[in-house]
Image (spheres, helix red, strand yellow):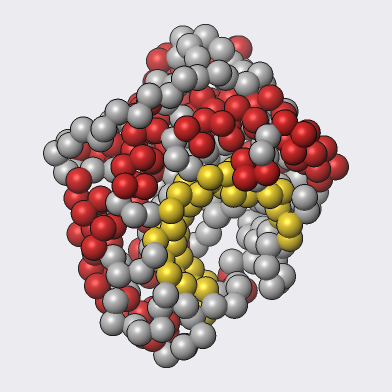
Amino acid sequence: MSAVSTTLATPHLVDRPNGDWQMQLRQAFRRLPDLLAHLQLAPAQLPALRADAMHFPLLVPRAFAARMRPGDPHDPLLWQVLPLAAEARAGQGETLDPVGDKASERSLGMLQKYRGRALLLTTAACAIHCRYCFRQHYDYAASNAARGDWHEVVAAIASDSTIHEVILSGGDPLSLSTERLRRLTDQLRQIPHLRRLRIHTRWPVVLPDRVDRELLDWLGELPWPVTIVVHANHPAEIDAAVSSACQALRRSGAWLLNQSVLLAGVNDDADCLAALSDALQQAGVLPYYLHLLDPVAGAGRFRVGERRGRALIAELRARLPGYLVPRLAREKAGEAAKLVLA
């Protein structure tokens, strides 16, 4: 896909009623015919669609759909969320647990893959269902993410003085109300060996109204350095509202990084990735990782090879300052760290 050139404004965050984002999520597209009608597309213009994706149904907030190009069956934002019939067939090497989450469980709702860090599966809910999601088959019902009970996982962290960083993940942790997030961090505050908090979220990009005054106040109250890792794959995802939300998060004191996934048909060309890095910087976000696709069952249409990924990074290095070039990485089950490839 060709890159999109956009001049981003960064207006001050407009205070909205807390909870407005929840209403917007309730109004999201959940039926494929409704989304296609909104985009003025007929099913005949698209590859064979999947109507039975019940384990991972369509979910697209209207704020995200508004950035898609009407009448364009190849729109890169649409391609990320469009359920296709091909998803029902797992390709060679694809699995339900491509990054070894199950083997990394140390407590209900807590994963430990890397030394010094604990990742909490805070919820199964997301703001959007991306068809390449590596946790789309995860059994959240068996974890604390479904129960909302954190006593066991907090006790596990408190008992291990080698854990210095807690990562809030999911699902998407910002799918929880700010009050529930505050109750969790109030428990974590009691653990003296914690030094850092990280939040992995797509909400500020997908539905930027989630960044309301209540959320910003909570972030400003936290006792640790906070890093927020957002997830944008294409420059068209970053409009003025997204930029404003990210700037507000920065003003709360958080550091902002971005993780992208290298996706065929979405961002697998240097023009697009360069424009994404520029748009991220304008929004106050530093490019961090460009991940090769995790081989999750049914997502083979997005796969881009390592050789192509390395070539794209080399081209970005020739165009951009080093701090705007993300690291090409792959996550492999059982490894002590992500594998940085370029």
Q: Is residue 319 left or right of residue 108?
A: right
* Quadrant assignment for the N terminus: top right
Q: Please, is residue 123 above or below residue 231 in the view? A: below
Q: Is residue 38 left or right of residue 131?
A: left
What residue is rendered at 40% in x and 21% in y?
A: 66
Q: Residue furthest left?
A: 17
Residue closest to the eye, 173 or 195:
195
Q: Please, is residue 125 above or below residue 52 in the view? A: below
Q: Is residue 98 left or right of residue 18?
A: right
What residue is rendered at 65% in x and 26% in y?
A: 272
What residue is rendered at 30% in x and 70% in y?
A: 223
Q: Please, is residue 163 above or below residue 215 in the view? A: below
On the image, the x and y values in percent for residue 182 come to 24, 64
On the image, the x and y values in percent for residue 259 come to 57, 47
The answer to which image quadrant residue 310 occupies is top right
Q: Is residue 30 left or right of residue 296?
A: left
